[in-house]
């Protein structure tokens, strides 16, 4: 076929020059809607190599001006008459021509992933394509640019950066930063995939990071093939873990830079031995599973975020069918609550002799594009964050973020409700803490409140319930006032004094059931721990003067001992003395629970707390699903 192409190269060029593309691409844009905001599919067309030009091969791939569409031209041998061409077009989200540099690709595609991972999200970049199409060249350049961004001080805050680079050859994994020792890809008891045996290196500067990347590249497995003398016969996964020491409860950000093994056409494998044939089968199988996983996760995210008119069944993500996708389980698993963004760079060989393989590459890339149908009839709903625009979101933040209020302009400068739901936890909390006077506990409580509203609204939609809109606007509009009051009592806030909470100091509103933060005295220092900023948390039970004379605190000491000359401690004389002296309350300790951010009330672990030691009221909310209490605002 190559000889036929060389013999008819001039005719091929003539037919290509006469080609007139369709007015609109016929592929990739037929379904109305927008591409998934969390996955970006691009194509990079490398320049023609010198030996390809010297042999006389023409260019078979062209960029269509002003679009993200590529036109492919393939020479056909007719039964009789002159050769003809068959033309195809494929559309992706971004296209980079032979004149584009790796820096251009980085600025457009990969650079936004760095602050995303810095803020606690998961950013993933895949480079895919035929062997010899420039994948490794592209990934190597991107890794250097990522190292510069991470270490140049342009990102906000302090982070600890760790790097791990592994290689997946078939079903076997190797640690490229530990003399290529074999490791295991396993799931722990929590369902999290672990790279057992892989070493992770902490880096503090650009040079050390680049040295590790270079060392890993030298140990990667390559082998000669028909198209490339140093073809990558394995997948290389560079994982950069970014830890935020200021928010220990937040999950670490992850940035993956993945150089996939080169795909091959059937004609390129005719001279392979049994080992090379087995490698090719495993590579193509893993790439097929990867495609299904990327599409499945994008479809799952489209179903979860916001009301949808789509009637399809829940997306299936087969991440356990390949070692590659099992390693990246938290990227693809729909059950994961991690915020993920994915970039795919399809590397294309423009030589007309390889148009068949290039078509397969772009066909694969185009199938990764998930078009999210435009939602019709979605109107604003106060209880559904997925329906809020930026103005409505800001209004809700200002009214529901507690005291002091969280700045809506800092938390959501341009995000809508669905976009803020995608924001990583660490980035959400970091933005909240930029507001004056906001504590980490308030930020975490507000984030939980925002997500609880979204989860409740999603469950409401799945159950197909259509409550009266009037009942949503005000609790007083409910046709069942007693039920409304019971629902309000799931929170420690006083359901009858909401208007007084911001006017009357909390020490003048102390009541049974109020949760307070207090400075533990020396006698309780070993018992009252786990509250905000190292303080104690307790639920107010009763004034000390009203407690039975036999009640003892957590230490075994009497709470209200009877002294000589004061037998009527419960009467008017005792009450008058209470008003003259520092008031004290019997309280039940609130202790941290097993789940992160959860608390339990120790009703039998009672302490006496002086009002002078109480620092602030703390709002807590009961969660029926986990059977724990959580901080709220």
Image (tube, grey):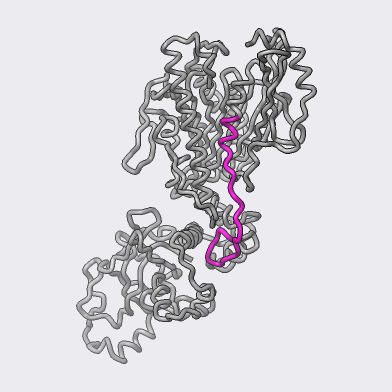
Residue for point 37% across, 22% down: 182
Residue found 46% across the figure and 40% down from its top = 332
Which residue is drawn at the image coordinates 58% and 52% (left, top)?
419
Residue 381: where, in percent of width, then height?
Answer: 57, 66
Is 385 a magenta residue? yes
Q: Nearer the viewer, residue 177 or 87?
A: 87
Q: Residue at point 29% right, 83% down?
A: 546
Where, quadrant-wise, is the N terminus in this rendering? top right
Taking the view exactly as shown, the residue that stands out farthest to the front is: 80
524 and 260: which is toward the camera: 260
Which quarter of the figure has residue 632?
bottom left
- In x, y percent, where is residue 413? 65, 55
Nearer to me, 8 or 166: 8
Q: As displayed, is residue 552 above or below residue 356?
A: below
Extent of the magenta region = 363-388
Most extreme residue toward the left is 550
Residue 567, given in percent of the width and then of the height, sits at: 22, 88
Is residue 265 part of the magenta span, yes or no? Answer: no
């Amino acid at each position: 076929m190559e000889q036929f192409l060389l013999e008819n190269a001039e005719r091929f060029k003539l037919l290509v020059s006469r080609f007139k593309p369709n007015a609109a691409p016929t592929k990739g844009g037929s379904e109305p809607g927008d591409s998934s905001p969390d996955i970006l599919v691009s194509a990079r067309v490398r320049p023609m190599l010198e030996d390809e030009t010297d042999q006389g091969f023409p260019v078979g791939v062209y960029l269509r001006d002003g679009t993200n569409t590529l036109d492919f031209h393939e020479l056909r041998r007719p039964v009789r008459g002159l050769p003809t061409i068959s033309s195809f077009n494929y559309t992706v989200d971004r296209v980079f021509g032979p004149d584009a540099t790796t820096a251009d690709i980085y600025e457009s595609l990969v650079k936004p992933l760095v602050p995303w991972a810095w803020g606690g999200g998961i950013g993933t970049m895949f480079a895919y394509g035929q062997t010899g199409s420039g994948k490794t060249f592209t990934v190597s350049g991107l890794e250097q640019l990522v190292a510069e961004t991470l270490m140049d001080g342009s990102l906000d805050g302090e982070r600890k950066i760790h790097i791990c680079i592994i290689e997946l050859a078939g079903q076997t994994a190797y640690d490229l930063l530990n003399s290529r020792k074999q490791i295991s890809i396993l799931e722990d008891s929590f369902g999290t995939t672990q790279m057992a045996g892989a070493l992770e290196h902490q880096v503090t500067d650009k040079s050390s990071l680049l040295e590790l990347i270079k060392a890993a590249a030298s140990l990667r497995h390559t082998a000669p093939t028909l198209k490339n003398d140093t073809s990558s016969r394995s997948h290389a996964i560079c994982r950069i873990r970014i830890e935020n020491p200021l928010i220990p409860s937040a999950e670490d950000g992850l940035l993956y830079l993945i150089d996939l093994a080169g795909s091959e056409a059937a004609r390129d494998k005719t001279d392979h031995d049994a080992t090379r044939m087995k490698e090719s089968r495993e590579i193509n199988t893993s790439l097929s599973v990867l495609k299904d996983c990327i599409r499945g996760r994008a479809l799952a995210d489209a179903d979860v975020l916001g009301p949808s008119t789509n009637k399809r069944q829940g997306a299936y993500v087969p991440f356990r069918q390949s070692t590659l996708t099992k390693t990246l389980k938290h990227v693809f698993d729909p059950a994961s609550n991690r915020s993920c963004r994915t970039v795919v760079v399809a590397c294309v060989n423009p030589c007309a002799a390889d148009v068949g393989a290039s078509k397969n590459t772009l066909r694969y890339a185009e199938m990764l594009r998930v078009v999210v149908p435009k939602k019709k009839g979605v109107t604003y709903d106060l209880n559904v964050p997925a329906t809020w625009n930026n103005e409505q979101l800001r209004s809700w933040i200002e009214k529901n973020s507690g005291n002091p209020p969280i700045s809506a302009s800092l938390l959501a400068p341009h995000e809508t409700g669905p976009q803020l739901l995608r924001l990583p936890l660490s980035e959400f909390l970091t933005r909240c803490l930029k507001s004056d006077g906001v504590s980490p506990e308030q930020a975490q409580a507000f984030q939980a409140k925002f997500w609880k509203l979204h989860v409740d609204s999603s469950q409401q939609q799945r159950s197909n319930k259509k409550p009266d809109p009037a009942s949503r606007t005000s609790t007083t509009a409910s046709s069942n006032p007693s039920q409304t009051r019971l629902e309000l009592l799931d929170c420690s806030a006083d359901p009858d004094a909401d208007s007084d909470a911001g006017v009357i100091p909390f020490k003048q509103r102390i009541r049974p059931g109020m949760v307070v933060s207090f400075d533990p005295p020396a006698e309780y220092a070993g018992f009252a721990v786990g509250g905000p900023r190292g303080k104690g948390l307790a639920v107010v039970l009763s004034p000390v003067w009203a407690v039975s004379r036999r009640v003892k605190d957590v230490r075994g000491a009497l709470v209200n001992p009877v002294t000589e000359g004061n037998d009527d401690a419960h009467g008017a004389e005792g009450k008058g003395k209470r008003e003259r002296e520092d008031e004290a309350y019997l309280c039940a300790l609130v202790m941290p629970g097993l789940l992160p951010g959860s608390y339990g009330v120790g009703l039998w672990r009672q302490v006496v707390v002086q009002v002078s030691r109480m620092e602030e009221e703390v709002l807590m909310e009961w969660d029926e699903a986990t059977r724990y209490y959580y901080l709220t605002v």
